Image: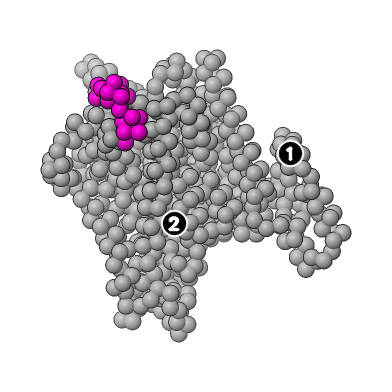
């Protein structure tokens, strides 16, 4: 167990290092001079330019800049914004910090039980009309991109039927469509996996034994089937989280939600690279951390993983 | 038997494969959709009665009718002509990404498996780093650095796509290494290059085809997402993702642009995914029973 833990931890550290170096290098190589952009119509003001350059540490050697970048990160600081001169990146993204995890978390909480339930339902009726129908819906749910589905939903539910607001943030009803749209592909993905795993589990000897000893079908499914389905599903939580992160960029843009995704996109267009990189870094850290935890949990639950057996 | 060899043995001859393909409903439906999109991309822009570039301010947000079959957009451009051109853009990006990712992924995967040692370590750690970032974050990062455009999209999506192909190739070649015919080739003193290209490659092609066909849908979706966010294909070139973004603000009064573009995009990805799933069922017997 200890070597397994050390191995995973090394992987996590490597990932974090890669993210730190990559965002720092990206910041160095982005096009344009940020100071010129910040100066705007005061472009002839050499004194101000020199002062800003010093404040942003842009005239220091690259190595020194890197060290202070890393030191800043250790203190939870990601540098200064280009778009809002003198403002810390952490305060630019502070508002979004409360929003994106909320939407993504709600979508995940909705997608997990729904996806598993639908997948198990289809598996238990394998080959029936209901199963075929579910599979068809799942292909559609997995295939249509968030924003294409959002177009249809906003047009149908908000404009034609008038049930939900078109966009905005603040009232709970405004969160319904964004969360639903984030949850749909995640749920479809989970449902497909749950169906596959359930079909596999139902063919196992211990299921036949459970049935043979006269156990009620409901108990066979719940006690012996579902439990063994949940285990492999745990491993894909990381993949789903990756999809949700990309999804927040799209959904927040469509619905005008002031979350991290929208701030990141706006920052790209405003050439506010420190903010963009800060958000990229944050998403990558969360992603790496969740994957690390999932790996650990899987190792704890399934001893074969710990022993380094092929998964 | 190795995984790759097993896959070949099970699929049988070409004639049997075609017969099974024709019986496979989702593969057939998918290939009909994909063929339609490919035809639209190839000859659509030639058949369109209007030019996809020409703006006409007298017909801004013109609803579908005789003159503009699917209506006109915010600049009075023909939506149908732009949808057809959009199909071409989408497919050019998808096949460009696939070509680069395949060449890089297969080459590195083979070398990693065959040479082992530091080549293997470097290639696989590079793949690990790419996997460490959530889905499109790297693509967004590259687009932010290089500025948006078709070549940036192709490059950034190729960067995201090659590691999966390299890992798959590596695993397949490793399992082939123990095969008798490869050992025989080595014993005969066949040059490494020849072993890899003429003995290994043909045996891993079915698996690569499955991988590619499953991947196309994702690439089309990723390109549309980047274009929708404004980080992908740029005006005046049409992209389905960009058309949806242009159409969203006018959804209340003139929903045609956004809805038609969303339908084209959705149908195309569904087609590719159905075809991919079908091919996987047919070519990969280990998954067929699922």
The dominant secondary structure in magenta is helix
Crowd band around label 2 with a 10 angstrom C-alpha radius: few (<14), some (14–19), many (20+): many
Q: Which residue is mark 1?
A: A63
Specify start and end residues of the magenta stretch as a single range.
Answer: B176-197
Examine the rendering and report whether any part of residue A75 can be seen.
no
Mark 2 residue element: helix
Nearest the eye: B109 or A190: B109
State whether discs 1 and 2 lie on one chain. no
In the displayed structure, B234 sits above or below B209; it is below
Please report, as a chain letter, where disc 1 is located. Answer: A
In what quadrant of the picture does the C terminus of chain B appear? top left
- CA distance separating discs 1 and 2: 38 Å
Q: Residue at x 35, y 36 (%)?
A: A193
**Whether label 1 touches label 2, CB < 8 Å:** no
Q: Residue at x 25, y 44 (%)?
A: B278
Q: Which residue is mark 2?
A: B224
Residue A221 image point, x, y percent: 30, 27
Question: Residue B82 bears which disc, if any?
Answer: none
Q: Residue at x 12, y 40 (%)?
A: B16
Please report, as a chain letter, where disc 2 is located. Answer: B
């Amino acid at each position: 167990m200890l070597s397994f833990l050390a191995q995973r931890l090394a992987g996590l550290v490597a990932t974090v290092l890669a993210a730190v170096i990559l965002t720092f290098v990206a910041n160095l190589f982005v096009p344009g001079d940020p100071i010129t952009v910040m100066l705007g119509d005061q472009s002839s003001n050499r004194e101000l330019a020199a002062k800003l350059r010093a404040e942003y540490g842009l005239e220091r050697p690259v190595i020194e800049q890197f060290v202070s970048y890393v030191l800043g990160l250790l203190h939870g600081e990601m540098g200064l914004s280009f778009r809002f001169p003198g403002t810390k990146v952490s305060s630019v993204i502070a508002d979004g910090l409360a929003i994106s995890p909320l939407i993504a978390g709600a979508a995940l909480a909705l997608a997990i039980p729904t996806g598993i339930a639908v997948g198990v339902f289809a598996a238990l009726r394998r080959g029936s009309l209901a199963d075929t129908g579910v599979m068809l819906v799942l292909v559609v749910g997995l295939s249509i991109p968030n924003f294409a589905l959002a177009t249809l939903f906003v047009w149908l539910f908000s404009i034609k039927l008038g049930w939900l607001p078109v966009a905005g943030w603040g009232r709970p009803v405004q969160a319904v469509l964004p969360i639903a749209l984030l949850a749909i592909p995640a749920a479809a993905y989970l449902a497909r996996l749950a169906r596959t795993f359930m079909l596999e589990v139902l063919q196992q000897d211990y299921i036949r034994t459970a049935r043979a000893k006269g156990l009620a079908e409901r108990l066979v499914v719940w006690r012996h089937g579902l439990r063994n389905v949940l285990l492999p599903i745990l491993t894909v939580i990381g993949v789903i989280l990756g999809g949700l992160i990309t999804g927040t960029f799209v959904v927040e843009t469509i619905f005008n939600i002031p979350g991290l995704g929208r701030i990141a996109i706006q920052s790209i267009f405003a050439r506010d690279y420190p903010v963009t990189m800060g958000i990229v870094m944050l998403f990558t850290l969360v992603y790496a951390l969740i994957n690390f935890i999932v790996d650990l949990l899987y190792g704890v639950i399934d001893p074969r993983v710990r022993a380094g057996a092929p998964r | 038997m190795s995984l790759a060899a097993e896959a070949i043995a099970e699929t049988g001859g070409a004639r049997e494969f075609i017969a099974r393909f024709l019986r496979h409903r989702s593969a057939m439906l998918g290939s009909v959709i994909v063929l339609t999109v490919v035809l639209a991309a190839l000859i659509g822009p030639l058949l369109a009665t209007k030019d996809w570039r020409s703006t006409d301010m007298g017909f801004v947000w013109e609803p579908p009718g005789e003159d503009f079959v699917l209506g006109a957009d915010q600049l009075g451009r023909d939506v149908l002509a732009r949808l057809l051109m959009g199909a071409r853009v989408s497919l050019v990006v998808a096949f460009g990404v696939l070509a680069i990712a395949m060449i890089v992924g297969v080459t590195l995967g083979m070398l990693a498996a065959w040479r082992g040692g530091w080549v293997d370590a470097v290639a696989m750690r590079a793949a690990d780093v790419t996997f460490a970032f959530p889905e499109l974050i790297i693509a967004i990062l590259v687009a932010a650095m290089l500025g948006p455009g078709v070549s940036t999209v192709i490059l950034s999506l190729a960067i995201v796509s090659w590691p999966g192909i390299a890992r798959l190739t590596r695993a397949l070649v490793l399992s082939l290494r123990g095969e008798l015919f490869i050992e025989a080739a080595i014993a005969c003193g066949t040059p490494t290059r020849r072993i890899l290209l003429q003995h290994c490659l043909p045996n891993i092609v079915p698996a690569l085809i499955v991988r590619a066909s499953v991947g196309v849908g994702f690439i089309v979706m990723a390109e549309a997402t980047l274009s929708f966010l404004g980080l992908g294909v740029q005006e005046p070139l049409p992209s389905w993702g960009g058309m949806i973004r242009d159409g969203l603000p006018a959804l209340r009064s003139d929903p045609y642009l956004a809805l038609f573009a969303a339908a084209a995009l959705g149908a195309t990805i569904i087609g590719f995914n159905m075809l991919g799933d079908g091919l996987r069922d047919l070519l990969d017997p280990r998954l067929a029973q699922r």
